[in-house]
Each structure stands twice: as C-alpha cells, then as structure tokens.
Image (tube, helix red, strand yellow):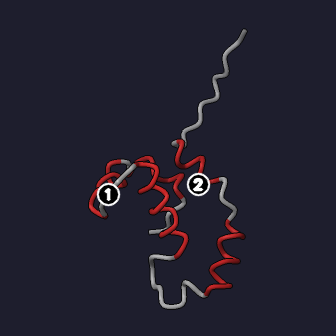
Amino acid sequence: MSKSNHFSTKSVFGQLISLIDDSMIKREVKKCDSDRYTKRFTTKDHLISMLFCSFSKCTSLREISGAMLGLSGKTAGFQLNH
C-alpha cells in the first residue's frame, strides 16, 4: 500500500470555498443588485467572511478579523478580494 505524497496547500475552508461556483454568486448579485453601492467589500467577500465566522464559531467581528489576520499566510485559498 503506497501513500499519496500529494498534500493540498489549501486549508479545509479554502477547499470548501473553492466548491462554490462564481457564476452562481454573480447571477444572484445581479438579480438582487446587492453590489449597487459597494466600493470594495462585495457580496462575495461578505459571504466568505460569514461562512468563515460560522465554521470557526466566532461571535464578533473582532474575532473574525483576528482569526483571518492570524491565518494571513493561508488565506490565499479563501478567494477574498479585500
């Protein structure tokens, strides 16, 4: 029995986020016009941060930002723009 040497560099959360289809998010954003007044923090960024909050069981915005800053080297797979 040989073991696989192919380890993913993405976190589990990054792998879960990559399963979300971007076209589905864009379609819903267009339908609801939810990015109408945004400048930087888009609906997709909000969705990802709220999913991160839920999965990491954070209870405040400070906890979310602290946890994301703590993982700053590993958040490339999160697909956050800002």
Residue drawn where x is 67% and y is 66% of the image: 22
Left or right: 8 with respect to 23?
A: left
- How many labels were placed on the picture? 2
User: SS class of the residue under badge 2?
Assistant: helix
Where is residue 51 drawn, in percent x and y?
49, 58
Where is residue 18 drawn, in percent x and y?
63, 53
Mark 2 surroundings: few (<14), some (14-19) or many (≥20) residues within 10 A: some
Q: Which residue is denoted by mark 1 in the rendering?
A: 59
Mark 1 surroundings: few (<14), some (14-19) or many (≥20) residues within 10 A: few
Compared to residue 3, the image places residue 47 above or below, namely: below
Number of the front mark, 1 or 2: 1
- Check the image and name the residue furthest to the top: 1
The numbered dot on residue 73 is: none
**Amino acid beneath label 1:** Thr
Instruction: Say which of 54 and 40 sits in front.
Output: 54
Left or right: 19 with respect to 38?
A: right
Instruction: Say which of 15 and 58 sits in front.
Output: 58
Where is residue 37 drawn, in percent x and y?
48, 90
Query: In which quadrant of the rendered image does the C terminus lie?
Result: bottom left
Residue drawn where x is 33% and y is 54% of the image: 69
Q: Which residue is denoted by mark 2 in the rendering?
A: 17
**Are dots 1 and 2 in contact, CB under 8 Å?**
no
Compared to residue 19, the image places residue 23 above or below, namely: below
User: SS class of the residue under badge 1?
Assistant: loop
Instruction: Say which of 56 and 38 sits in front.
Output: 56
Where is residue 81 drawn, in percent x and y?
49, 68
Query: In which quadrant of the rendered image does the N terminus lie?
Result: top right
Left or right: 42 with respect to 53?
A: right
Which of the two discs, 1 and 2, labels the residue nearer the N terminus? 2
**Amino acid beneath label 2:** Ile
- Between the C-alphas of marks 1 and 2, the distance is 21 Å
Residue drawn where x is 45% and y is 62% of the image: 49
